[in-house]
Image (tube, helix red, strand yellow):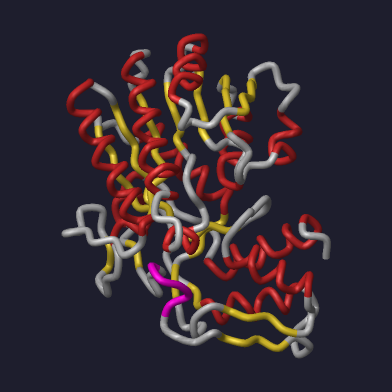
Amino acid sequence: MNILVTGGAGFIGSHLIDLLLDQGHKLTCVDNLYLGRIKNIQHRLEDKNFKFYKLDVLNLKGLKEVFKKSGFSAVFHLVANSDIKQSSTDTKLDLKLNFLSTYNILEAMRINNVRDIVFASSSAIFGETDKLITEDAGPLMPISFYGASKLAAEAYISAYVHNFGMRAWLIRFPNVVGGRATHGILYDLMHQLKKNVRRIKVLGNGEQEKPYLYVKELVEGMVFIWQKAKNNYNCFNLGPVSTIKVSRIAQIILEELGLKGKTLIEYSGGERGWSGDVPRYRYSLDKVKKLGWRAQLSPEEAVRLSVRELKKEYGF
């Protein structure tokens, strides 16, 4: 198929591009390189089935031109603000990067008669809950601007599906780790260690506990759902079956870098890392298991493998 991947030079997008090209699809990547990196897709630039455009999807005119000359059959929309903490000080950030980017994609699809969109959503749309989160949980009350904008984007996708005969696959991501990471706890703590190997500061009290999924398993799950789920509007949680505490992640980093017993771990305190952080959540994965997919790595295995990959990448 002829597929557009938005944000394809980023952490998750570049792994998705690798998988889709290896499956034989023809791909176009658009990325403004604000967070994406050319080095993430450098090994694909000479591939005859791959095109890259440095383009901000908020530029609707430029986006329409790419659509018009490319004849896409599907869109994987991954453009988003990945710095959730920053959105509490810049309240327009998620509005633009998460919601308006999605609106522009939907409009370009409508105008050019492209039916299929796979959307990278988030656990953040659910807000705080002690309940096991199913796909039909509600009412949804996000506590971050990131979660609110992702939820608004989901609503617009639903409206476009029902008004214009489109099809959608909404994949609600957990926390994701792996090589090429440009944000997240591994990025933050390992870059702290680059500056000072004697101590790291972890946001919150370390008791935050969440599912962490290895990035290559995430993109395999995304593509599996896209290929197997047949409804016009498809919504799935994706993740591992268990969770891991932030304090354990910090310990694994020190173990893998040979710093156990040499580096002091400090905690900023409080039950959450920042305003809008959801300190713990648990997904129900019954729906995606019934479809036939499950993660092979536990969160601890995913974190440990990711640190090993990032050691060389980050210069350790």
197 sits to left or right of 179: right
Q: Position of residue 235 (x, y in %)?
A: 29, 44
**Picture coordinates of residue 274 (x, y %)?**
45, 72
At horizontal 57% and vertical 86% (from top left) the residue drawn is 267
Residue 158 in percent (x, y) is at 23, 36
What residue is at 44 percent from the left and 70 percent from the top? 210
Which quarter of the image is occupied by the C terminus?
Answer: bottom right
Residue at image point 41% right, 36% down: 101
Q: Which residues are magenta?
A: 272-276
Q: Kindly indicate the quadrant of the structure image that contains residue 313.
A: bottom right
Question: Which residue of the protein is positioned furthest toward the top in this rendering?
Answer: 69
Q: Number of marks in the image?
A: 0
Q: Quadrant of residue 196?
A: bottom right
Placement of 226 over or under 49, stated as above or below? below
Q: Nearer the viewer, residue 207 or 104?
A: 104
Q: Answer above or below: position of 166 versus 249.
A: above
Please tell me which residue is depicted at 52% across the width and 43% down the height of the picture.
219
Foreground pick, 30 / 49? 30
Question: Is residue 195 rendered to the left or right of residue 24?
Answer: right
On screen, 111 above or below 158?
above
Q: Position of residue 61 (x, y in %)?
A: 45, 19
**Does residue 159 appear left or right of residue 116 in this picture?**
left
Which secondary structure is most common in the magenta stretch?
loop
Please determine whether, in this image, residue 200 is positioned above or below residue 102: below
Q: Is residue 183 magenta-colored?
A: no
